[in-house]
Amino acid sequence: MLKRPSDESGPSARSGLRRSVASLGIKVGAAGLTYLMYIALSRTMGETAYGEFTLGLSLAIVLAVVAGLGQQTSILRFWPEENAQKRPVEAHRALRAGSALTIFGGVGITIVALGIIGLAGVSGGSIGSLGYLAAGAVAILPMAFAEYSSSALRAQGSVWIALLPRDVLWRLGVCGAAAVFLTTGTGLDGSEALLLTSAILVLALCLQALAAWRAGYLLAPGVEGLRKYWAERGASSKWFLTGALIDSAALNLDTLVVGLLIAPEIAGVYFNAFRTAGLMTLFLFASALVIAPMISDGFHGGNKQNAQKILAVSAWTGFAFSLAMFLGFLMFGESVLSLFGEGNEAGYPVLIILSIGLLFDAATGPSRTTMMMTGHEKRYVQIFGTTTTISVVLQILVVPFFGIVGAALVNMTSRIVAQLLIGWWCRRHIGLDPTILAPLSMRREYAGGA
């Protein structure tokens, strides 16, 4: 008998805010644990080894998105869309097919990545020098499936089971292991740190699968109906994949460019500054995790007004949080960065520059989620993909001359341009305003209706 878990269901602005608060609590805990993890690893590994770890991790994150084949976003749209249109069989097929595609993609990308790294190592005369990249490739499959399982559970209405294993238990486990190595004086190289994090992530995923099964949520893969699913939903999935890849590239290619064009240890400084700046969008990101299926349900179910209310609440709470974090970075940014070890204070200008771009990101609210959940993923890819591509090209040209500050300035500018364009598109072509101007849009609409 087909079952859709009903706890935490019923899309509304109030329930969305409650789940966003719960998600924020988990994400704040995850951010704190991530900081402890990076700090412990940085102090245990040394500058060069830690830089190699950040490069391998950044590569794994980008390739894990490719391995997901867009399914981590697809399920957030198709599960609520199919259920809103009274087609539970199709919703369950989408979930099983997405799980199977993620596994197939993860295995395939891992094999290809290891093959390319092996050939590069042989041609260069030393496979060992690229060991940290190979270790990063091993992390592709668990990272890809962790992202999909989290999305699938959120689509079904779960918050705690969806987020707690990966965001808290995984990071807590890595923190504990890193603390042991730090206190015993045992050093880790980049490869060992990446393999350690992968092993602990696999354990967290096993615990998540067990908890999901006991609660009645669905995660199991299935190949039955896979061909039909891809024929019907493959086009959208490809755009979801491209959009997710662009998002991941915007967050991780900076570190790769800096590491390859300057040095791994400088990449570590940039990585720490970028991850610190990213804390500004913590609430907005946590909110988007929850409201994505609610926006899809409201838009495709004919309740556009409710979707707009949810977007307005998310935009303003996210922006207020981001503004408070930005002011905190202005005053205490150097002290925060110094936790990673000596020399990281040099990333303070990068932190502030990137934070300005992310403040504009927060002001435009969950605009990406709005486009992805309403069937405008192609246009999102065109807008954000163009600005991101230009940004990467400019960074390659700028970094050799202006270093990490140049990389940050390019990132900030491209992010501001992209987010303003995306926010405008949502208001003009979708009829939903995801920005902090949403209350004004709603007031004009109500006035016109009156």
Image: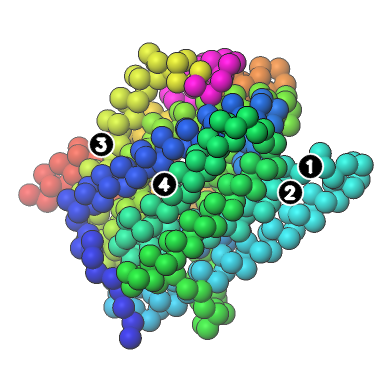
Vertical comparison of 220 with 419: above or below: below
| Mark 1 vs mark 4, CA separation in Å | 30 Å
Q: Quadrant of residue 264?
A: top right
Kindly identify which residue carries mark 1. Answer: 130
Q: Main secondary structure of the magenta part?
A: helix
- Residue at left offset 33%, top offset 86%: 1
State yes or no: discs 2 and 4 in contact (Cβ < 8 Å): no
Q: Position of residue 27 (x, y in %)?
A: 37, 42
Display coloring: rainbow
- Residue at left offset 42%, top offset 67%: 210
Label 4 sits on what residue type?
Val
Q: Nearer the viewer, residue 95 or 110?
A: 110
State yes or no: discs 2 and 1 in contact (Cβ < 8 Å): yes
Q: Position of residue 81 (x, y in %)?
A: 34, 68
At mark 2, the secondary structure is helix
Label 1 sits on what residue type?
Leu
- Residue at left offset 12%, top offset 51%: 449
Q: Which contiguous range is marked in magenta?
A: 339-357
State which mark lies toward you, 1 or 4: 4
Which badge, 1 or 4, comes first in the chain's sequence? Answer: 1
| Mark 3 vs mark 4, CA separation in Å | 26 Å
Kindly identify which residue carries mark 3. Answer: 316
Which badge, 1 or 3, comes first in the chain's sequence? Answer: 1
State which mark lies toward you, 3 or 2: 2
Q: Nearer the viewer, residue 190 or 285?
A: 190
| Mark 3 vs mark 2, CA separation in Å | 42 Å
